[in-house]
């Protein structure tokens, strides 16, 4: 597979959120606004890229029976690094995402890619896969966050489009996440069926 | 390179090695980010004090006092002084009565006990409802919902539903009660200081 193909695979064809339906917990939990979705998506993309790279480097020295705990330790290390850095240099983003950052460890996208891609492919391919999947995840979260923010508060990236009082509050709350995600997946399936 | 066999020795060695390397990496990053994290927390606190207090020229962090309420909770007071004269205080107060529990505020009082300003430091209230605390109670265009300039010792700072003088946030009465509870507790903690 060419590098470009690996990269776009995660972005569109196997988008982790819209197609594989992986990592639903942070997807539904953090996308109350576009900027939160983007922040969470980029944090996950960074972890995914680093963990994919390291896992594929060490795949041959990890005995099969302990590969899952070994992968989890590697992933958790990168997540904690992201958490420290965000707390130090992006405190306002950390305030709104703080609770969900540690949850990247158990995000099944990350472990899923380590297990199904990085453990079988070369380090360079794994970086591209991590980057593609991560950006696909970030893209999906940003779209979902944007839709919810727009319908709920009349803003996108905090820029007012229409007065907030016309917004349907439900889209900012948890049920709106399910509704918006459901419709987005339906639209994407429709588009995919056409091609 | 062939895959390592899953023998007991290999598994123990590999897992030990991985956890050691991970621990070392984390310790390094922790050391690197410790200072910036402390500073950003400190800066947040100082900014909050500056935002809520009348102008001051002392170091409120150095002069802080801890006050104990009758129910045993500890409230931190940061006195603001200008030229050695007491001009007010920022009170870091909290309540557990929020819709999602804990709410932490920084409330600034003038020397006469009236509220100068406040800042919501930490909360987990519902976005779009209870989370409006910061804007709602400081909207001086609507005197019936603003607490700025009111004195908890004179005015009754409870929601109008409970017979008080403050209009609750629409559809977020519990958050509003909790907010005012935190303000009241802050005042209770600081009122002995104000008399001096």
Image (cartoon, coloured by chain):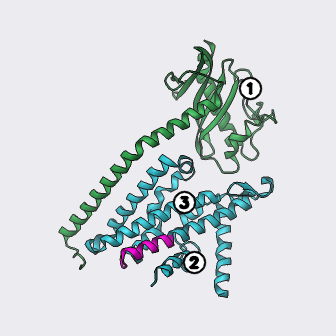
Chain colours: A cyan, B green
Residue at the location (45% across, 51% down)? Answer: A85
Distance from Cα at disc 3 to Cα at disc 1: 40 Å
Q: Is residue A73 left or right of residue B122?
A: left
Residue at the location (50% across, 60% down)? Answer: A43
The chain to which mark 1 is attached is: B
As for residue A51 lying within the magenta part, the answer is: no
The correct choice, above or below, for A104 with respect to A58 in the image is above
Q: Quadrant of residue A67?
A: bottom left
Residue A45's spot in the image, x, y percent?
A: 49, 65
Q: Which residue is mark 1?
A: B150
Distance from Cα at disc 2 to Cα at disc 3: 19 Å
Of B83 and B42, nearer the camera is B83
| Badge 1 element | loop
The residue stretch that appears in magenta: A119-133
Residue A86's spot in the image, x, y percent?
A: 49, 51
Residue A39's spot in the image, x, y percent?
A: 56, 58
Checking the image for residue B161, the label placed there is none
Quadrant for the C terminus of chain B in the image? top right
Q: Residue furthest top?
A: B196
| Badge 3 element | helix
Q: Which residue is mark 3?
A: A40
Q: Is residue B49 left or right of residue A59?
A: right
Say few, some or many: other residues with alpha carbon within 10 Å of mark 1 (under 14 / 14 to 19 / 20 or more): some
Q: Which residue is mark 2?
A: A12
């Amino acid at each position: 597979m060419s590098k470009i193909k690996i990269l776009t695979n995660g972005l569109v064809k196997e988008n982790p959120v819209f197609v594989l339906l992986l990592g639903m917990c942070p997807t539904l939990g953090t996308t109350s606004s576009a900027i939160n979705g983007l922040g969470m998506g980029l944090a996950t993309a960074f972890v995914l890229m680093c963990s994919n790279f390291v896992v594929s480097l060490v795949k041959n020295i990890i005995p099969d029976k302990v590969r899952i705990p070994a992968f989890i330790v590697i992933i958790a290390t990168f997540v904690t690094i992201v958490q420290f850095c965000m707390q130090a240099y992006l405190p306002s983003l950390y305030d709104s995402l703080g609770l969900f950052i540690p949850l990247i460890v158990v995000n099944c996208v990350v472990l899923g890619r380590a297990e199904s891609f990085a453990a079988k492919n070369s380090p360079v391919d794994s970086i591209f896969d991590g980057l593609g999947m991560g950006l696909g995840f970030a893209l999906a979260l940003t779209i979902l966050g944007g839709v919810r923010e727009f319908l709920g508060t009349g803003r996108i990236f905090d820029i007012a489009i229409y007065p907030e009082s016309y917004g349907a509050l439900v889209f900012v709350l948890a049920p709106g996440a399910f509704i918006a995600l459901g419709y987005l997946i339906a639209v994407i399936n429709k588009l995919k069926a056409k091609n | 390179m062939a895959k390592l066999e899953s023998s007991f020795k290999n598994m123990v060695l590999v897992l030990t090695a991985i956890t050691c390397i991970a621990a070392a990496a984390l310790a390094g990053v922790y050391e690197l980010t410790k200072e910036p994290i402390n500073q950003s927390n400190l800066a947040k606190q100082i900014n909050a004090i500056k935002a809520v207090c009348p102008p001051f020229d002392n170091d409120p962090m150095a002069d802080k006092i801890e006050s104990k309420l009758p129910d045993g909770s500890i409230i931190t007071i940061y006195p603001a002084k200008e030229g050695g004269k007491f001009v007010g205080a920022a009170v870091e107060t909290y309540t557990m009565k929020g819709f999602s529990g804990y709410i932490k505020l920084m409330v600034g009082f003038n020397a006469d006990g009236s509220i100068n300003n406040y800042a919501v430091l930490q909360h987990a209230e519902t976005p779009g409802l209870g989370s409006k605390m910061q804007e709602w109670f400081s909207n001086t265009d609507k005197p019936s919902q603003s607490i700025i300039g009111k004195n908890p010792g004179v005015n009754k700072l409870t929601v109008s539903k409970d017979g008080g003088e403050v209009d609750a946030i629409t559809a977020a009465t519990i958050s509003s009660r909790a907010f005012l509870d935190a303000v009241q507790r802050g005042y209770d903690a600081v009122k002995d200081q104000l008399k001096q």
